[in-house]
Amino acid sequence: MDDWTYMWEEADAYGRVGMVLGAIVGVVTFLSIWIWTWFSGFVIGFVLGWIPAWFFAVIAFLLVRYLWGFAVLAALFLYLKTTQS
């Protein structure tokens, strides 16, 4: 647990926001994939569905943690382009 505390204390504002958003996206990704494998007829999806769910949740966490700023810039650019009169 000390590693997470150290990582939080050493992060700047961009890193802290990225960690919070990444954690939210990671949990949502994990739950959605695990439930999907459970209901889609995957063999023993309830028991083994956590394996692909964990894998993709970690990837989603890392992508959001480091690249969330680009998504905000893209959304802002898209908003400005679509609201011009």
Image: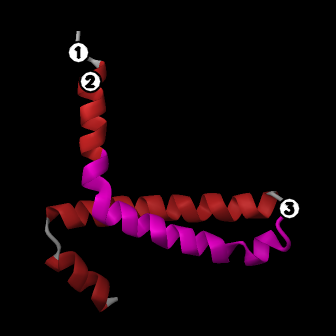
Query: How many labels sit on residues?
Result: 3
Crowding at dot 1, Cα within 10 Å, few <14 / some 14-19 / many 20+, comes out as few
Q: Which corner quadrant of the image does residue 38 belong to?
A: bottom right
Identify the image quadrant of the C terminus.
top left
Name which of mark 3 and mark 2 comes first in the sequence.
Answer: 3
Specify the farthest residue to the bottom.
2
What amino acid type is highlighted by mark number 2? Lys
44 inside magenta stretch: yes
Question: Which mark is in front, 3 or 2?
Answer: 2
Specify the farthest residue to the top.
85
Give SS at disc 2. helix
Horizontally, residue 54 falls left or right of residue 62, namely: right
Q: Where is residue 39 shown, x and y percent of the image?
A: 80, 58
What amino acid type is highlighted by mark number 3? Gly
Q: Which residue is mark 2?
A: 81
**In the rendered structure, are the residues bearing label 2 and label 1 in contact, judged by CB atoms less than 8 Å apart?**
yes
Q: Which residue is mark 1?
A: 84
Q: Which residue is mark 3?
A: 41
